[in-house]
Image: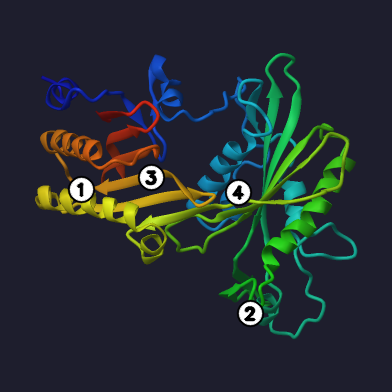
Amino acid sequence: MNIKKSLLFFIAPVIFLVSCSDDDPVVKNDEKMYITSIQKKQIYEIKQPAKSNVSRGLILSNMNNSLNVNEIEKGLMELSVDYFSTKNFYLQEGQYLDKNIINQWLDRKSTEGSGLNPSINSRSGDILEDEKNNPKILSHVLEQNFINKENGNVEGLSLAISLNEFYDIKVADDKGLIYTDQVKVDINDDEIDDVVNYGKEIAEIIVKDIRKNENIPNVPIYMTLYQESNINDIIPGLFLADTFIAKGEDNINKWTKIDRKNYTFPSDALYSLDQDTYNKLLILKEDIQKNFNHLNPKIIGKLRYENGKLTDIKINVNVPLINDTELIGLLQFNSTKLNAILFDYVPVTIRIIDQKQDVGIVIWDATEKQIFASPL
C-alpha cells in the first residue's frame, strides 16, 4: 500500500489533493487551477509564452531578504485584482522598467541625473557617517503588466515602490576598505512618517517619467508603497498606501491607506492583538508537541490581518527526518485538530517540513468548510 492510498484510508473523510509549494500550495497536472476554488482567491492566468521581468535578478540584490521579495510580488498581484480583473486580464511580468531605468531612480539626487534617493549635499570626509546621516529610502520598483485577454494588448501597469525602514549601508573608501552599518530612516520622534511621505513624493516623479517614456504604453497605472521589514525579521514588510492613475494622467490626486499587517506566532504582538486566535494556535502547537514529542516538532505561524480582521493563517511544522508512517499520523492529527478548532471563515494552511523540504500539507478551506490533506 503506497503512502497516498494509506492516507486516504486513515483520515477519510477529509478531501485530498496532491500539491507542492514554497508558500501557497499549487496543485499538479490537470488539477493545477483547483487551488483557486479551494481558497476562493482570484488568481491571474499568466500570459503564455511566459516572459521574465526585464529587470530580472535586480529585485534580489536591491531588497534585503526573500521574505520581502515574496511579499511584494504576491501582494502587488493580490492588490491589483481590484483594478485589473482576473476575468479580463492576463498577468505578465514587467516588460518596460529595465535595469537601467530602475538603477537611475535608485541613484542619489543630482543636478545631472534622475536619481530619487536623498543627495549628500555636504560631505564630511567620513563616508560611513555621510551615508548614515543621509540614508537611502528607495530600494526597488517592481512592475507587473496586465494584458487584455481579447485583444492581447497591455492595458494596465501595476507598480510597487519599495522603501527602506532601515538602510543597510555597505560602502568602500579610496583604499578599497569596506564599511557596513545600519540606520533607521525615520529617526524623528514626531508623528510624521518620513518614509511614506518620501515615497509619495518620488511616486509623482516616477509617474511623470513613465508618461514621458514613449516606449511605455499610456495605460492606467495602479501604484502602491511598500515598506521593507528589517533584514533579520521573520515576517515581511507592509504595504502602506495605494493610488490609481487613469490613462493619460500624470498626477496623483489621492492616496488610500492600506491596513494589511503580518504577525508571527508565537509573539507578544499577536497575543496583545488577538488573544482568542493566539490561544487556539497555542492549543494546536502544544498538542502537536505532546503527541509527536519524539519528532521534536518546531511550530511557527504567520498570520495576516487586513483592516483589523484576520484573513489568513499559515503554519509551518518542522519535523526533521520524519518517516512515512509518522507523516501519515501527523497529517491525520492536524486534520482532526483543525476540524475541532474552529477558525470560521479564515483559510488555514499547515506545511509539514522535513529539513527545508515540504513533505505534507493540510488546508482548511474556510469557504467550503472542508479539510484537504496530502503527502507531497
The residue that disc 2 covers is: 189
Q: Is residue 198 above or below residue 213?
A: below
Check if mark 1's residue and mark 4's residue have beta carbons within 8 Å.
no
Residue 165 location, x and y as percent? 60, 65
- Residue at x 69% of width, y 84% of height: 126
Q: Secondary structure at mark 4?
A: helix
| Mark number, residue 313 | 3
CA gap between label 3 and label 1 equals 22 Å
Residue 213 location, x and y as percent? 87, 40
The residue that disc 4 covers is: 59
Res 86 → quadrant: top right
| In this picture, residue 48 sits left or right of residue 14 | right
Q: Earlier in the sequence, mark 3 or mark 4?
A: 4
Q: Earlier in the sequence, mark 2 or mark 4?
A: 4
Label 1 crowd (10 A; few <14 / some 14-19 / many >=20): some
| Mark number, residue 320 | 1
Q: Is residue 40 above or below residue 338?
A: above
| Amino acid found under the numbered disc labelled 3 | Ile
| Amino acid found under the numbered disc labelled 2 | Asp
- Mark in the foreground, 3 or 4: 3
Residue 209 location, x and y as percent? 85, 47
CA gap between label 3 and label 2 equals 34 Å
Q: Secondary structure at mark 3?
A: strand
Check if mark 3's residue and mark 1's residue have beta carbons within 8 Å.
no
| Amino acid found under the numbered disc labelled 4 | Ile
CA gap between label 1 and label 4 equals 32 Å
